Image (spheres, grey):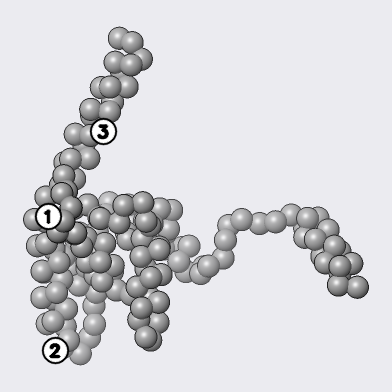
Amino acid sequence: MRKDGKNAHRQYLNKSNRLKADDMHTLGPNSYALLRHELQQEDPNKEPLSQAKVYIKSRIRNPKRKYKTSYQKPKQNMEKMEALSAQQHEGATYQDSYYKVIKKSEHSGRLRLYGTSVTKSTMKRGNNSNFMLPKQFLQCMERDWVERIQ
């Protein structure tokens, strides 16, 4: 087989596998982090968002657009989440309805609806980046700034 034939076969397999997915988000190239930020900015109290709200907002469909995947499963999940959240408003304790409707992933370290490479441990650390600048570079930059200020 030529390389072109192999690539065509891979593309066919990738396309068929993507069409098997029945619960796709409609964010396009936008990330979950961007969606979370926008939703949090809309909230007057700037409170942390529930996973259910992020799930629902990431599955909203435009009625004018034609989609390749079915909307049946996300619609059912959203209805279940809304029903559970309505029941919880009557009760005293609050639990995110997302976790009751959507099963946990096999990978326990991964957090869904936060984006790639976000784990529980990175969330506990906060916004600290794993990227470190060398001390020599920082000292050089500090000297430059001191000289400019003087």
Q: What's under tag 1, amino acid-wise?
A: Tyr
Using the image as rendered, state which of residue 149 and residue 104 is in the foreground.
Answer: 149
Locate residue 77, reporting x and y percent. Answer: 13, 63
What residue do we see at 20% from left, 72% from top?
A: 97
Q: CA distance from mark 1 to mark 3?
A: 20 Å
Q: Which of the two discs, 2 and 1, labels the residue nearer the N terminus?
A: 1
Give the CA distance from mark 2 to mark 1.
Answer: 30 Å
Residue shown at 10%/69% (left/top)?
A: 79
Which is in the foreground here, disc 1 or disc 3? 1
Amino acid type of the residue tagged 2 in the rendering:
Glu
Quadrant location of the C terminus in the rendered image: bottom right
The local secondary structure at tag 3 comes to helix
Instruction: Say what amino acid the circle numbered 3 marks.
Output: Asn
Distance between mark 2 and mark 3 Cα atoms: 45 Å
Residue at the front extreme, as displayed:
64
Residue 120 position (above or below residue 71): below
Instruction: Compare residues 63 and 53 and report the one nearer the observer.
Output: 63
Contact (Cβ within 8 Å) of mark 1 with mark 3: no
Vertical arrangement, residue 21 with respect to residue 123, above or below = above
Residue at the spot of label 3: 14
User: Which mark, by number, is residue 127?
Assistant: none
Looking at the rendered structure, the secondary structure element under dot 1 is loop
Residue 146, how many percent across, how many down? 86, 69
Single out the mark in the foreground, 2 or 1: 1
- Give the residue at mark 1: 71
Residue 84 position by quadrant:
bottom left
Label 2 sits on residue: 90
Locate residue 86 relative to residue 108 in the image: left or right.
left
